[in-house]
Image: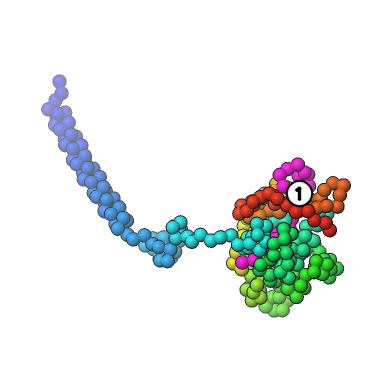
Amino acid sequence: MRSERDKEADLVRAAELIEFSEARREQMERGRQSAVQGAQKATARPIETPESHRATGGDQAGQAAVLLQCAADVKPQPVLWLWPDWLPVGKLTVLAGAAGTGKTTLALSLAATVTRGGQWPDGTACAHPGQVLIWSSEDDPADTLVPRLMAGGTDLNRVHFVCNVAKADGELMPFDPARDMPLLGERMAAMGAVRLLIVDPILSAVGGDAHRANDVRRDLQPLVDLAARHGCAVIGISHFSKGSKGNAPVERVIGSQAFGALARMVLVTVKEEGAERRILARAKSNIAPDDGGFAYAL
């Protein structure tokens, strides 16, 4: 049989457990009430509108925050075109093809149409003539580019080659598309009416690894932003990668597939075997039909 001392010890432990349970219940109740009050305060706090939301993430000054935009506040805008359904304004178009298909010559022919307000290959008129900027690391302006522009009937007064960057101390440095896009944007803003920018090759606009998707997307973003900010079409010329014959045209663009993914339009050039005829076709489009094409000769 248990002694009186053991019974007294059991009663003491039982009393301690009851006291602990009561304290725990009071603590849980205080926590529940605090949570309810916090939820009520959060519900009562007004939701910021796009005009009033601030870059603050809490009560502490200088804390970063994610900003949201309500879809109801977005005003739909139509896609603008330099050449309807072929050259979108404010977006990147990649023009790719194998060597010898006349990619640069074709791009210069389109530039000629922009400078003189001529007709596009489908017979439609260029409704927004203006100035053209060209950066090329592969062809010399004097012996290659200007003669081709002249042959296409270009208004040479409206074509400008992107050459060098003048530093503050007067030193001249070659223009680097991967580094100097913001400076080019300043010149475009001062010029006005720049309708077309040609970058040849588009691969040079990537300062990192052109075969890594993250590098391509990061380095091409300044070019994409420049096109959107200044409302000009951008043609980035590229080659087909070796050994890619038989793949889908977009997948043949040299470098990472991010080149084709980031561009809203991908145009490709091919040469018919045993003939001089060449074909310009749409290989990818997020904003227009992605079929159809035109024959051309050099």
The outermost residue toward the top is: 1
Query: Which residue is more in the foreground, 88 or 252?
Result: 88
Residue 237 belongs to the span the image colors magenta: yes
Name which residue lies at 76% across and 44% down: 244
- Which residue is at 61% across, 66% downward? 231
Residue type at the position of mark 1: Ser
User: Picture quarter containing residue 169?
Assistant: bottom right
Q: Work out which residue is located at the far front of the displayed protein and give it.
A: 123
Q: In the displayed orientation, state which residue is furthest to the right.
A: 274
**In the displayed structure, does residue 100 sit left or right of residue 230?**
right
- Quadrant where the C terminus is found in the figure: bottom right
Residue 241: x and y in percent read 76, 49
Q: Nearer the viewer, residue 11 or 53?
A: 53
From the viewer's perspective, is 99 left or right of 202? right
Q: How many marks?
A: 1
Residue that appears at 75% across and 67% down: 112
Q: Does residue 262 show up?
A: no
Q: Is residue 146 above or below residue 251?
A: below
Q: Which residues are magenta?
A: 231-249
* Residue 237 seen from this side: yes
From the image, tell me which residue sits under label 1: 241
| Image-quadrant location for residue 60 | bottom left
Quarter of the view holding residue 158: bottom right
Observer-nearest residue: 213 or 232? 232
Q: Circle 1 — which element?
A: loop
Magenta-span inclusion, residue 184: no
Q: Quadrant of the N terminus?
A: top left
Query: In the displayed image of the protein, which residue is found farthest to the left?
Result: 4
**Residue 228 place in picture, x, y as percent:** 60, 64
